[in-house]
Image: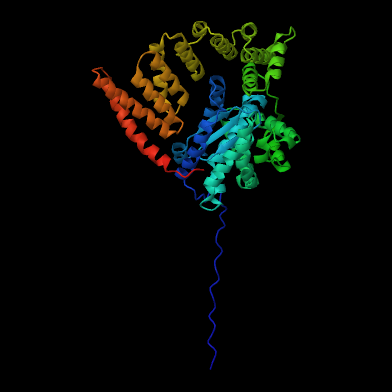
Amino acid sequence: MAALPVRAQPQPQPQPQVLPGLSDGAEMTAGAERELGDRIARELYRDPDYVDDPVLTDYVQGIWRPLLAAARQRGELTPELDERFAWVVMIGRDRTINAFALPGGYLGVHTGLIALVGSRDELASVLAHELTHVTQRHISRIFTQQSRQMPLMLAAMLLGGLAMSKSGRSGGDLGSAMMVGGQAMAMQKQLDFSRDMEREADRIGFGVMSQAGFAPQGAASMFEKLQYASRLNDNGSYPYLRSHPLTSERITEMQARFQFRDGAPAQAIPLTPEHAMVTARARVLGRPGVDLLRQWMQAAQRNDVPAGAAGAGVLYAGALAAKELRDLPAARSLVQKLRAQAGTAPEPARLARLLAAEIEMAGGNPAAAAALLDVRAKTRGEMLMAAQAAVLVRTNAAGAAPVLRDWVAVHPRDATVWRELASLYEVDGDTLRAIRAEAEGHVAQLDYVAARDRFRAAQDFVRDTTARGGRVDHIEASIVDVRAREVERLARAQMEEKPM
């Protein structure tokens, strides 16, 4: 039998090689990532070390907002992610040097990091780096590499890892954290970003911070600090270096970006009085212990306190430390020195004035604090402190409430302002609005079950008041009914969630 002729097989044509970007191929949808991030954030909101300090939050937000705007302009932040993700920076009371990105557009910053950085530009470099991890979907890619059941497990372990880094916890709390954290350590490599992801976050983050108007040498000096800190990383005090390991290649690449611009070496960023005061606040609020508080107070009381930014930081730390130690005469004396040194420079003078008001409230003199504050100020921090003073004085609550109400109309996820608004309504005798504001505060922090209970309480109040022949605002009652139905669905879904 003759052999069949062999047909020549057509040769495959070479296909153009397309290199995928790091953010390509993320199977986890933006909605699923946001849902996972909400679950983690809800636990962090409940943590007693979650801090919404008026001064620190204003300062961080003043850096965060330009970075977000620059990411939009550069096209790094797509319209879909811009709409779907939370884009919230949470501050944790912790002395460790740490910042982290969470699924769904949540970022975390420890007070220890704020206390370490030497300028707004250094902090901007860290936030831009973490922002890039989110915009490039690095977190989604890590989760996608695991099985379908792994994201919740990793989320729980991430919470355990954060708990492990806490300082000043009780033995029982630390034991619980260690039980969860033991598993977290076993999966640490699954949570770490790859070297390629780190390099991409360096490159894009550098571009974002530069376009946002921050000095590029801030990234340089931050890398130098982290490089030095990496040599001291045996005691676990620098979790940022464990999750973002520095390599000689990354350091060299970053130095090449900033060291020589326009043919001239980059100039060092000078310390400003504003930044010195903010970092001093972060150190004190990190709960360093009584001994350090006394040392800072005594250092500020010496006659050789330097002038300029360094002296402003010393006086601020001393005055705030004296307040924490309940030594109000010393706190008042030091804050007056601080105000005199700040002079008429707008931002240092404002920070010194806010600290003076804070000390007066702590000293039981809210009227003096109210005289130093303006509820219609342009900054959220002063608005909040003025509202707190109005509650303590129990006057002008009706005048302060509309200002806060206008704020939450634009920022509905601001739980702290909702709660302060509830206090103002309570002082003013507007019980229905006070209960609703409490409920909205729970909604803002994703605790829909607690929010549902408060909306039900508001509905009960309306029924009881009407049954007794009292009068209620029917428009407000209608709003409560609508919101109660919306939150009821969310609470039901939340109760059906599997525990992490």
Question: So how many labels did they put on this image?
Answer: 0
Q: Residue at x 62, y 32 (%)?
A: 125
Left or right: where 247 falls relative to 469: right
Left or right: where 420 falls relative to 285: left
Residue 138 visible in the shown view: no
Judge by depth and name the residue closer to the eye, 426 or 286.
Answer: 426
Q: Residue at x 60, y 13 (%)?
A: 348
Q: Residue at x 52, y 35 (%)?
A: 43
Q: Position of residue 121 (x, y in %)?
A: 62, 27
Q: Position of residue 280 (x, y in %)?
A: 65, 19
| Residue 321 image-quadrant placement | top right
Residue furthest toward the bottom? 1
Q: Position of residue 134 (x, y in %)?
A: 54, 40
| Residue 325 image-quadrant placement | top right
In the rendered image, the vertical position of residue 95 relative to residue 131, given as above or below: above
In the rendered image, the vertical position of residue 279 relative to residue 495, given as above or below: above
